[in-house]
Image: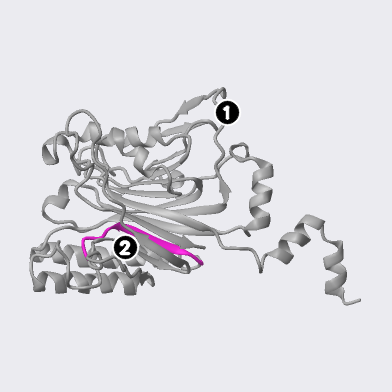
Amino acid sequence: MHPAEAMQQQQHPRTRAVAQGASTSQQREISILLWNTWLLPGPLSDNNTYNRASEIPAHIVSHDIILLNEAFTHKSLIIDALRSTHPYVATLPRRCWFWPIFDSGLVVLSRYAILEVRRTRFGKRRRWDLFAGKGSIGVRVDLSRRYKPEPATATTTTTTTTTNERHSVAARPMLNDDNDAAEDSYSDTESEFDDDDEEEEEERFPPKTIDIYNTHMQAGNSRGEHKARHAQSVQLGQFIAQNSFRASAVVLGGDLNMGPILESVHYADDQDGKERVKAYGTLKDESGLDDVKVLVEGKGGDINRFMTRGVRVVKVEYPDVPVVKKGKGKGKKLSDSDMVVLRIKV
């Protein structure tokens, strides 16, 4: 008998079954929602941010990974409402308490375990963007470890440190610490997952990680804003390349304020379009990611978009933007930006 065959026969039955089924196991299909929520301070939006934030969770809960932009205010309403379904959260807070006035407005929520978090803050911002701490969050997600909510009777204990809050199993692991050691990684506890469910998941799907980045880039069409957007494209592209050069699957989503084609309702004129397309090409080249082509009519030049590597894109969808159901602003849209859903197989 060949040595390799003898070794295979000595393997544990479950290990051998996983190894034999790895080549034929199906890929996971996951949905990633991207939404610029327009949760600016009241006077800068519609003076109805609290009411809108309260209604947002019901419209996004069905997706596996949620990327929010412009969640400058009332983000805790959304995070807390999704506590039982999306227990992993990463944010990009301000580096110091007094400037910029607002944080990045970026939030990542996940059904699956977040293993590591990487953050970068843009070195160049111009005009109105100087008031927001824009940048990017990168998370490494373990698709073989999906959270199972604790029973409703479970008790929750909370310990508070000087830099952020760390919660027990039944509460949320908040990955928003600005301490270098804390922000670079997060190790979840085994008790958050059901062992039987995890074994079944592993038999159907081999363990797989995916790197997901959320960003909101420079807005505007002035010369200074174009230069800042180009600099951000270089910085973000290199940030992704350096942190995910070994990753087999990568997704970038966000309000990029640019796209791959000249036609966009967000551009002032052809020259503005050319500058943004050029910056988009720089981001593509620096990051090593590919553009996700949008086939939905009229959305090909949308600035809220995705770029990927190593995944199979199933579909890009643009659900109707929900409207406020009750109270102030009833009947008006929850955001001035489209919701975008990327469905992929990994």
User: Where's residue 320, x and y in %?
Assistant: 28, 50
Residue drawn at point x = 57 percent, y = 24 percent = 154
Q: Earlier in the sequence, mark 2 or mark 1?
A: 1
| Mark linked to residue 236 | 2
Q: Secondary structure at mark 2?
A: helix
Q: Amino acid at mark 2?
A: Leu
Q: Nearer the viewer, mark 2 or mark 1?
A: 1
| Residues shaded magenta | 248-258
Question: Which residue in the protein does label 1 denote?
Answer: 151
Res. 231 visible in picture? yes
**Residue 257: in magenta span:** yes
Q: How many numbered tags mark residues here? A: 2
Q: Secondary structure at mark 1?
A: loop
Residue drawn at point x = 16 percent, y = 57 percent = 219
User: Where's residue 261, x and y in %?
Assistant: 22, 73
Residue sitting farthest toward the bottom: 2
Near mark 1 (Cα within 10 A), the count class, few <14, some 14-19 or many ≥20, is few
Residue drawn at point x = 28 percent, y = 68 percent = 234
